[in-house]
Image: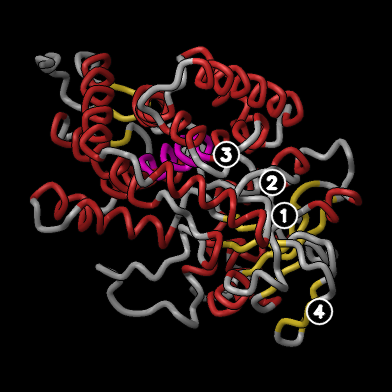
Amino acid sequence: MSNPAPGSQGESLIAQGCPVSAGSSHVRLDTPSFAADPHRAYAEMRRHGPLVPIELAPGVPATLVIGYQVAMQILNDEPHFPADPRRWEKTAPADSPMVPMLGYRQNALRTAGLEHERYRRTIMAALDTVDMHKVHGAVARAADALINDFCERGTADLRTDYAYPLTFRVLSELMGFPEDAATAAYHGMAAMLEGVGAEEGQQRFVEALIGVVEQKRAEPGDDLTSELLKHPDGLDAMEMVNQAALLFSMGTEPTCNLILNALLLLMTDEQYGGEVLSGAMATRDAIDAVLFEDPPLANWCASYPRQPQLVGDVWLPADQPVIISLAACNNDPSVVGGDRRGNRSHLAWGGGPHGCPAQTLAQTITAQGIDLLLDALPDIRPKVEAQQLPWRQGPFHRALAALPVEFPACPPMRLV
């Protein structure tokens, strides 16, 4: 990816003061222009080198890593780049929407060392019990019912009519969440991701999960929440809430966005779409292309160095977030080249001791959800040009606000 040439659109972005402002030392990631075209922003950022000073929100400075090799160094160096944010949290603005999103949690994402190992161990043990036949059944039931709801209309919004309710239903079933608790948890999590009503969203999220954990303690079932409760490490009530919250949040929102981003590629790129529909290419290859180009969590994997750290020729401040731009690193010109088909060296699942433990589950839900939709509606296509599609604001995700489509109307499938 090359830097914008003089007089190009890149120069007009700077003239607008967003996302890279000519007189500013920090790049803003919470702007409409960044959400609309982050790859232009990443191209401009490369003028700074692999480490870019950013603001996650007003008054919340951080460093964004956009170089692949530097990212690998940091992801695999937990002693110098721990994921525990407690010292940062003491200095962060108390009312910042980033505190609910990045603040300390008793879970495998926001801890380090032995504490992290304990929480990750419980999650890995629970995930090891997942029956993939049960997953396939849950995806098939949800997909068939959802497609039947809109197939006679000849039009749909694949976010609200398909990808969101699909991942929501599947994860709720796997976690053993009642529908009302799952709904409250999902909307609370979405508020935290977007930074709008984040504190209230966090409260709704936690309250919903407390109720689920209490119910599962009294009446355990065949689900992930009950498996977490069974673990010999003996998580207490809030530790349980935090592990359940992590599994649910990472299983719903990013998976929903991965389905949408992959469907957009398949509907707008003749090579990928044609080859997947003809069987010449596996859906998994198209998903990996999206995980390289537009991973659903574009900027993530936060760490918080406890002392100033020298990386290359740049000193990173102590107790300030270091965020890995998974999207920018995947497309780093120093490592990009050749045919990526079958190449899974992307960082979309993170890396090092905090790499995503649920990759197989997320990939299964995504691939099956896509295949079932395209099998039922092979002539589906976007209703608007890809450049006109709205993207949700927020520094962390790459998420479509809507994906309106049209297709030849057809009768509902007979469900068995």
Residue at (89%, 39%) from the top-left corner? Answer: 94
What distance separates the C-alpha of mark 4 from that of mark 3? Answer: 34 Å
The residue type indicated by label 1 comes to Cys
Residue 323 at x, y percent in the picture:
67, 61
Residue position marked by numbered label 4 in the rendering = 315
The residue type indicated by label 4 comes to Trp
What distance separates the C-alpha of mark 1 from that of mark 2? Answer: 7 Å
What distance separates the C-alpha of mark 2 from that of mark 4? Answer: 27 Å
State the extent of the magenta-drawn residues as a range: 247-260
Mark with earlier residue (1, 4): 1
Residue position marked by numbered label 3 in the rendering = 243
The residue type indicated by label 3 comes to Gln
Residue 236 shows up from this direction: yes
Of tags 3 and 1, the one toward the viewer is 3
- The residue closer to the viewer here, 396 or 84, is 84
The residue type indicated by label 2 comes to Thr
What distance separates the C-alpha of mark 1 from that of mark 4? Answer: 25 Å
What distance separates the C-alpha of mark 2 from that of mark 3? Answer: 31 Å
Marking on residue 18: 1
Q: Is residue 250 magenta?
A: yes
